[in-house]
Image (spheres, grey):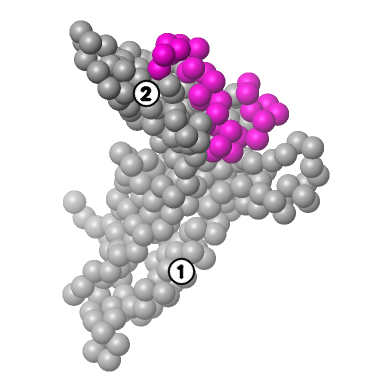
Amino acid sequence: MVFLTRHEFFNAAHRLSNPHWTDAQNEAVFGKCANANWHGHNYELIVTVKGSVNTETGFLMDVKVLSQILQQEVCEPLDHKNLNLDVPFLNGILPSTENLCIAIWNRIEPHLPKGVQLHRVKLYETPRIYVEYFGPLLNN
Amino acid sequence: MHQTALYRTEHFNAAHRLLCHDWNEEKNRTVFGKCFSPNYHGHNYKLTVGLKGIPDAQTGYLADTKWLSALIQRQVIDYMDHRNLNLDIEEFKILNPTVENIACVIYNRLRPFIENTIDLKIELYETERNRAEYPATW
């Protein structure tokens, strides 16, 4: 088994607030991240897939195809957008880095070629904060 | 003692959109593209503040970096971090919050607090590949 990784970037606005809570509760839990007028980040996305090497191509998968999936499914819908307002697949989801990671996994996974498995979605919100998601089947 | 430059780096995260208030929507979209997106987008800004001058003969300091850090925190980070530059920051009610203009606004917010004998320079990264410097030369 080999692992193949691709980096992509997108820049977006968001805010953290739970619509079922009062402003005071949101402020207490999310602090300045709850700012009503949004703030934003340069997100760095690192996606790793795994599988066997095709003996004819020498590829796990064509990285151009992986790049196209990431562009089409993640970067185009998210880049230069407001994650709370502009992205249909995030409707009703609080756009924390954790939830974004899971939503990105769900966007990418159905588009991978047969025999290629998604291994990890790693998402940096800032250079010092990142989240990793290894999929719903990972135990412990 | 010789002329020396001293730098301090800080970070802030903010939302913005680019637009010229004198233009209609179509022209703004043509010029600013996805940066004109109506619901804003955002960046992790990396700010480096440079001071240039002659270090003090006794302390060896051009400036105390703790003092410089506190000054940047008060004048820039507390003011801009986790804010919407267009909506929350007085200077950008009219002025377009490009990386060039943000660098210039930061310069103006720091300059009054730095001695006249010391030069000030602002370097601001909007993304890893886009940065502005103000003034353009020391």
Q: Which residue is mark 2?
A: B52
Q: Chain of mark 2?
A: B
Q: Nearer the viewer, residue B3 or A31?
A: B3
Q: CA distance from mark 1 to mark 2?
A: 48 Å
User: Residue at position x 33%, y 78% from top?
Assistant: A61
| Residue B7 to residue A6: above or below | above
**x, y (%) of residue A80?**
56, 49
Residues in magenta?
B90-118
User: Residue at position x 47%, y 42% from top?
Assistant: B131
User: Residue at position x 25%, y 18% from top?
Assistant: B1
Indicate the amino acid at tag 2. Answer: Lys
Indicate the amino acid at tag 1. Answer: Ile
User: Residue at position x 66%, y 49% from top?
Assistant: B32
Q: Which residue is mark 1?
A: A69
Q: Are marks 1 and 2 on the same chain?
A: no
Q: Chain of mark 1?
A: A
Quadrant containing the C terminus of chain B in the rendered view: top left
Q: Is residue B39 left or right of residue B60?
A: right
Secondary element under disc 1, as helix, strand or loop, is: helix
